[in-house]
Image (spheres, helix red, strand yellow):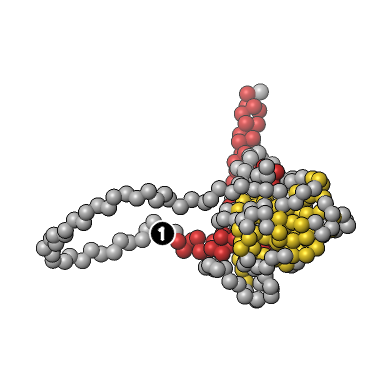
Amino acid sequence: MAESMGMRDRLLAGLLLVCLVLGLPGCASYNKAPVESRGHHGNTRAKNRPAVYIVRRGDTLFEIAWRYNLDYRRLARWNAIRRPYTIYPGQRLRLYRSRTVVASRARPSHARKPAVVPHKAKPPIQRVKKPRKTPTASKPVHERKLHWRWPVKGKLAQRFEPGSQVSKGIRIAGRVGQTIHTAESGKVVYAGSGLRGYGKLIIIKHNNNYLSAYGFNRKLLVKDKQKVTKGQKIAEMGTAPDGRAMLHFEIRREGKPVNPLAFLP
């Protein structure tokens, strides 16, 4: 009996050795380590935004930035465009930050330091200290505080919805031909009908951070690059796509839509 048990143990040991050598899948079970997909989280493409935009006749940098929910300064920086942000038909604009530009700015860790060339020491130069100027009462330049007003009197027909592709602002019902006023003073950076879904549209830049828009107009009373004051007449109310008379009003901070009701009195 003991001899048969020893024989069986030797046979099992031999089979196990064959499995290990040949690597048969049924001989041993093992779990693979999970593989993590490391994507570029900072470069996730926004919905419906192409990588490159070809400038068309009549386009402005502000209009393109508005269309794709971008800050106009960031769009200008990505494409090395300086003030006054002039663009040309046929020009290719990157709508995302270029990885190559960022990589070129990074300093390699293995870069050699420049050799130090010894030079003869120069005698110290005695400089006459200038008297310090008395501090003036001037204050550092800050963005002026904005005080918004309603662009038109009427009933609130649609509210702002965060993250919505449709309700990026509010809609105020009124009557056709009703006067539209500026919600704050600033400069017109777009006046036209090139943005789909807005009808005749006016975009006003109030400072480096805030823009406002007035859509569904019947008639525009201001032009591009025109300076406007708070409460100035800029348009006449038109109709929305459903035929109702109303104004579409937006406020954007650094290119992103924000709730106008949080700013209006």
User: Residue 230 in the image: x percent, y percent?
Assistant: 64, 54
Q: Is residue 95 left or right of residue 155?
A: left
Quarter holding the N terminus?
top right
Q: Nearer the viewer, residue 16 or 113?
A: 113
- Residue 112 visible at all: yes
What residue lies at 63% left-to-right and 40% top-to-bottom? 31
**Residue for badge 1:** 107
What residue lies at 49% left-to-right and 61% top-to-bottom? 103
The number of numbered badges drawn on the structure is 1
Packing grade of label 1 (10 A; few <14, some 14-19, many >=20) is few
Q: Nearer the viewer, residue 16 or 117?
A: 117
Query: Please, which residue is most extreme toward the left here?
Result: 123
What secondary structure is marked by label 1?
Answer: loop
User: Residue 47 in the image: x percent, y percent?
Assistant: 71, 55
What residue lies at 62% left-to-right and 51% top-to-bottom? 253
User: Residue 118 in the image: x percent, y percent?
Assistant: 17, 65
Q: Nearer the viewer, residue 37 or 34?
A: 37
The answer to whether residue 19 is above or below residue 80 is above
What residue lies at 11% left-to-right and 63% top-to-bottom? 123
Quarter holding the C terminus?
top right
- Specify the quadrant of the image occupied by residue 63: bottom right
